[in-house]
């Protein structure tokens, strides 16, 4: 059984910062790509940032220069440092990971963590 557990969400004022973490656990053999997505009320889930096992990153234009994705392969954890937050960043943030486990190779999703940015 593989699980992704996010933490670090919360309420912050515009201009503030938050750091999200997502830890993978279970019968993991290896993890390839990892990423963060978000979904605001009434909107579709959208990509925020992705990172390969080797550390190559990709960002949505809306967060470039403000958010930084990183990972610790030894801890099976991906992070999202969010600076200069704006009210439009308010959403539920989900992590995902391409995981090879004992029985499967598939994409897993976390349960989501709420980020609310007040103006």
Image: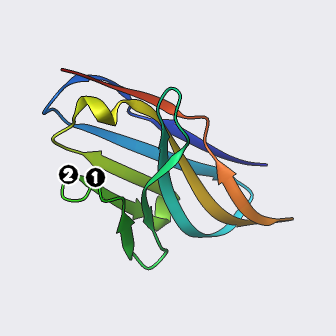
Query: In the picture provided, is 13 more to the left or to the right than 115?
Result: left
Choose between 22 and 118: the one closer to the eye: 118
Q: Quadrant of residue 55?
A: bottom left
Against 75, residue 114 (above or below) is above
Against 90, residue 49 (above or below) is below
Q: Secondary structure at mark 2?
A: loop
Q: In this figure, which residue is indicated by the disc labeled 2? A: 66
Q: In this figure, which residue is indicated by the disc labeled 1? A: 63
Residue at 68% x, 53% y is 108
Against 88, residue 73 (above or below) is below
Residue at 30% x, 33% y is 88
Q: Quadrant of residue 72?
A: bottom left
Q: Residues within 10 Å of mark 2 (few under 14, many from 20)?
A: few
Choose between 49 and 7: the one closer to the eye: 49
Q: Position of residue 92 (x, y in %)?
A: 48, 32
Q: How is the image coloured?
A: rainbow
Residue at 18% x, 20% y is 119
The CA distance from mark 2 to mark 1 is: 5 Å
Residue at 86% x, 65% y is 103
| Farthest bottom residue in view | 54
Query: In the picture provided, is 66 more to the left or to the right than 30?
Result: left
How many numbered marks does the figure carry? 2
Q: Position of residue 97 (x, y in %)?
A: 60, 59
In contact (CB < 8 Å): disc 2 and disc 1:
yes
């Amino acid at each position: 059984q593989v699980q992704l557990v996010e933490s670090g969400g919360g309420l912050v004022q515009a201009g503030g910062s938050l750091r999200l973490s997502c830890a993978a656990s279970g019968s993991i053999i290896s993890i390839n790509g990892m990423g963060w997505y978000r979904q605001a009320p009434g909107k579709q889930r959208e990509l925020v940032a992705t990172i390969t096992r080797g550390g190559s990153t990709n960002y949505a234009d809306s967060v470039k220069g403000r958010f930084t994705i990183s990972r610790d392969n030894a801890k099976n954890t991906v992070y999202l440092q969010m600076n200069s937050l704006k009210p439009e960043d308010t959403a539920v943030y989900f992590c995902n990971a391409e995981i090879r486990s004992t029985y499967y190779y598939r994409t897993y999703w976390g349960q989501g963590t709420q980020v609310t940015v007040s103006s």
